[in-house]
Amino acid sequence: MVLALAAAALAVFFVGPLVGLLERTPWRELPALLGEPEVRTALRLSLVCSLSATALSIVFGVPLAWLLGRTRFTGQSVVRALVLLPMVLPPVVGGVALLLAFGRRGLIGQWLDQWFGVRLPFTTAGVILAETFVAMPFLVITVEAALRSLDPRFEEAGATLGAGRWTVFRRVTLPMIGPSLAAGAALTWARALGEFGATITFAGNFEGRTQTVPLAVFLALETDPAAAIALSLVLLAVSVTVLAVVGTRVLAGRRVDAVPVAS
């Protein structure tokens, strides 16, 4: 009975929608649809914004993961909850929060506008900020878990040989958490690439400036369903590839961690 219920759930909730998408895909028209100027612009913008968001997530997320995984301080659970909040926060709510914080009259945005003339809402930079906000927690939680599971004796051995903290981190810690860092970066990129709610709320849906692939799919559903299906297929292929790569990286990291160290 348990196996039958599991098979039914797999067929109905997971395989069914994918089969429906593949069955309705206009395969013969797919190259022409993906070659349309609007589609290529959305793909290019999505690639630029998602990669930029991933880079920002690595720059700011790795120190956060180190802070949460290697230190102890008062209020650490609160800090972790705030960092991971975007994972459970409805994306539209996240977009509203970003608008109230970084909008022209927002808590931070008003000073950015007055002092530096920087306006983030409804710009490409706003898209990157929204994608970073919702995607960075995936990198933080993955790298933090890797740091917590890392045997500190390796780092202590490097320190006893005269290496400084930065050298130990660069030559010992970073290579050992490399698979987890790569997996977290891949998940972050996939999440940023598929972001919709926070982006459309904070940055809008302007072709060539803020219209990423998910927003183009939403708009094309009403005017050009074939193009919407083609773009959805692209996102589906990226998601499957990322999951396959992440699984391989994680398993490789576990195999490395499982290797015994000679005394």
Image (cartoon, helix red, strand yellow):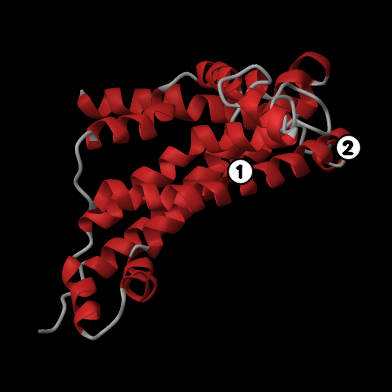
Furthest residue toward front: 115
Residue 36's tag is 2
Q: CA distance from mark 2 to mark 1?
A: 19 Å
Q: Is residue 149 left or right of residue 246?
A: left
* Residue 25 appears in the figure: no
* 162 lies above or below 190: below
Q: Is residue 66 left or right of residue 70?
A: right
Q: Residues within 10 Å of mark 1 (few under 14, many from 20)?
A: few
Q: Amino acid at mark 2?
A: Glu
Mark 2 or 1 closer to N-term? 2
Front-lying residue, 151 or 224: 151
Q: Amino acid at mark 1?
A: Ala
Residue 141, percent from left and from top: 34, 43
Residue 263, percent from left and from top: 10, 84
* 31 lies above or below 221: below
Q: Is residue 34 left or right of residue 92?
A: right
Furthest residue toward left: 263
Name the residue located 35 percent from the left edge and 52 percent from the top edge. 143
Q: Secondary structure at mark 2?
A: loop
* 119 lies above or below 166: above
Question: Disc 2, disc 1: CB below 8 Å?
Answer: no
Residue 237's tag is 1
Residue 225, percent from left and from top: 77, 21
Dividing the image into 4 quarters, which one contains the N terminus?
A: top left
* Residue 49 appears in the figure: yes
Name the residue located 39 percent from the left edge and 24 percent from the top edge. 88
